[in-house]
Image (cartoon, helix red, strand yellow):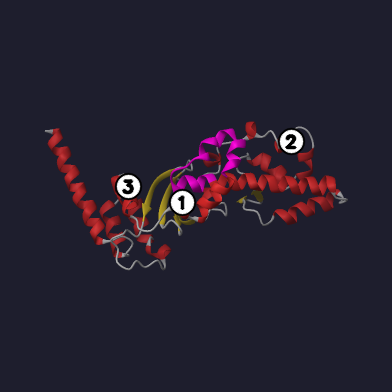
């Protein structure tokens, strides 16, 4: 953990509270007042929680938009049922979603079965008991990060770029935050690798996805020294910061040895 905390501490020029992601979050975080399960995300103190919060916010915005379209198409317009279905389908295509086979999940705070009504069975949402989802939906909310986990982050619900994925972890990169995120199979953050520290002279931000590949390979191999070397070789962190990390590691090991005597 010390390694990742040090990289974050010395990262240069990144203030997540000045990012577009954070501005979106601040603009819409009042929506958490309507969703009990995730009310704790009304206040966040790190950029990964902003990413997570924005997934939920976008899900709520999708819900509102689809419901407005359904009410218009099926109740306020003179469209026939088939025309109403087509109208809603055409107008929800631009919304972020998760694709599971042929099914689109527009509202990941809900189960896959409920999402079917929002994506393809619109008319039934106007009938009992589904019409209760419009206003009274808290009891239908799920732990979306555990249920959908990797799929959430590998979608347009975030700006993350997936660079590696297996059954246990997903590794992504965020260009605005200049950080690698390692996400576990429950959709939670295992670690983050902040790049471009303040000691790095004339940082080069080009072709980052290609340059982080050897870093990720060493991380997967649990090769800390190899990962540090790859970070330095690809000019992603400075030699000075690496030396500082190694020096502090040496001091901590010696302190533990003295304590064990």
Q: Could you tell me residue 11's position as x and y percent?
A: 34, 55
Among numbered discs 3 and 1, the one appearing first in the sequence: 3
**Distance in Å between CA atoms under marks 3 and 2:** 46 Å
**Other residues around mark 1 within 10 Å, as few (<14) / some (14–19) / many (≥20):** some
Helix, strand, or loop for circle 3? helix
Q: Could you tell me residue 248's position as x and y percent?
A: 20, 48
Among numbered discs 1 and 2, the one appearing first in the sequence: 1
Q: Can residue 157 be found in the magenta stretch?
A: no
Among numbered discs 3 and 2, the one appearing first in the sequence: 3
Secondary structure mostly seen in magenta is helix
**Distance in Å between CA atoms under marks 3 and 1:** 19 Å
**Range covered by the magenta-colored residues:** 29-53
The front one of 159 and 35 is 35
Residue with the mark numbered 2? 130
Residue with the mark numbered 3? 5
Give above or below for 179 relative to 113: below
For the point 47% across and 54% down, which residue is it?
18
């Amino acid at each position: 953990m010390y390694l990742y905390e040090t990289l974050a501490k010395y990262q240069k020029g990144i203030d997540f509270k000045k990012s577009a992601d954070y501005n979106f979050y601040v603009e819409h975080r009042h929506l958490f007042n309507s969703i009990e399960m995730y009310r704790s995300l009304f206040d966040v103190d790190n950029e990964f929680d902003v990413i997570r919060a924005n997934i939920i916010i976008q899900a709520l915005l999708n819900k509102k938009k689809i419901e407005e379209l359904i009410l218009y198409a099926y109740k306020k317009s003179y469209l026939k049922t088939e025309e109403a279905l087509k109208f809603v389908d055409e107008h929800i295509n631009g919304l972020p979603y998760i694709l599971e086979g042929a099914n689109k999940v527009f509202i990941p705070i809900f189960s896959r079965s409920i999402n079917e009504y929002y994506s393809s069975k619109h008319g039934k949402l106007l009938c009992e008991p589904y019409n209760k989802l419009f206003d009274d939906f808290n009891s239908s909310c799920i732990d979306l990060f555990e249920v959908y986990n990797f799929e959430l982050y590998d979608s347009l619900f975030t700006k993350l770029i997936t660079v590696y994925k297996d059954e246990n972890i997903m590794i992504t990169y965020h260009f605005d935050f200049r950080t690698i995120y390692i996400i576990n199979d429950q959709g939670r953050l295992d670690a983050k690798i902040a790049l471009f520290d303040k000691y790095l002279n004339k940082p080069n931000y080009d072709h980052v996805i290609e340059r982080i590949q050897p870093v990720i390979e060493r991380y997967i191999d649990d090769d800390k020294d190899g990962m540090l070397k790859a970070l330095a070789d690809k000019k992603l962190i400075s030699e000075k910061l690496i030396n500082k990390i190694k020096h502090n590691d040496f001091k901590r090991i010696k302190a533990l040895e003295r304590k064990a005597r």
